[in-house]
Amino acid sequence: MPVVEVYNQRREPVSRVDLDPTVFAVEVKEHLFHLLVRYQLARRRAGTHDVKERSEVSGGGKKPWRQKGSGRARQGTTRAVQWRGGGVVHGPTPRSHAIDVPRKVRRAALCAALTRRVEDGTLWVLDQITLDEIKTRKFQEIVDAFAWDKVLLVLPQKDEAVLRAARNIPGVAVLPVEGLNVYDVLRHRHLALLADAVPRIVERLGR
């Protein structure tokens, strides 16, 4: 069972916490990371790209020249795909780019990402975050204390004060437990959890 230190926002250890091994100490399967990143990024694509096929391009009702006798290839409309200004053949149309990934696989990938942060020693647990002012410099003091370059902070629930204080700091992202995902865990070098968020993560991902 992994055991990690719990720090205050000045990086002073205040206690220790046992992490659930079914969430924070699972087998890490690298291929799940690739699959889940594809899954998340595909779902973010709008899929609104579209072109006009020959039937959708206006005009072109008149036959350009007679069928025979001109010496040129026969043509039925100036909106055919080989004409400038004509339709596009086999072009993109609006569609969903989403791929299906079973819920159990999504859960396993997120547990593996959390486990990887524990193994790397880049998972931090904070007892709480208290800001006497909603100022970027106040949150920057916390970031500097822990020497974080890229960090994902996970809160037990949405906290508008922390969100507003952290939103302008490059490399810092703040999410509630419900928004915790593989892509954001992997793209940030450090993962910081508030102590109250740990049991909620276990509740969400535990067997």
Image (tube, rainbow, N blue to C red):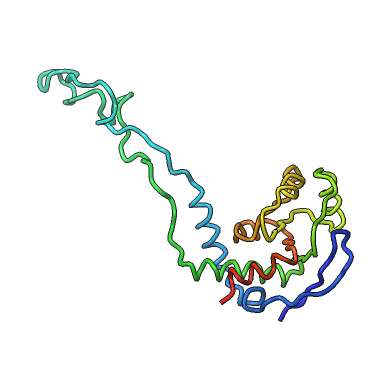
- Is the residue 23 above or below the residue 56 in the image? below
Nearest the eye: 125 or 33:
125
Q: Position of residue 148 (x, y in %)?
A: 80, 56
* Residue at x 74% of width, y 77% of height: 18
Q: Please give left or right for residue 164 compared with residue 201 in the image.
A: right
Determine the residue positioned at 46% across, 64% down: 101
Q: Is residue 42 left or right of residue 206?
A: left
Horizontal relation, residue 85 to residue 102: left or right: left
* Quadrant of the image containing the N terminus: bottom right
Indicate the position of residue 19 as horizontal and vertical percent values: 71, 75
| Front-most of residues 133 and 78 | 133
Residues 94 and 137: in front is 137
Relative vertical location of residue 80 with respect to residue 113 in this rendering, above or below: above
Figure quadrant of residue 32:
bottom right
In the rendered image, the quadrant that contains the C terminus is: bottom right
Q: Residue at x 33, y 24 (%)?
A: 85
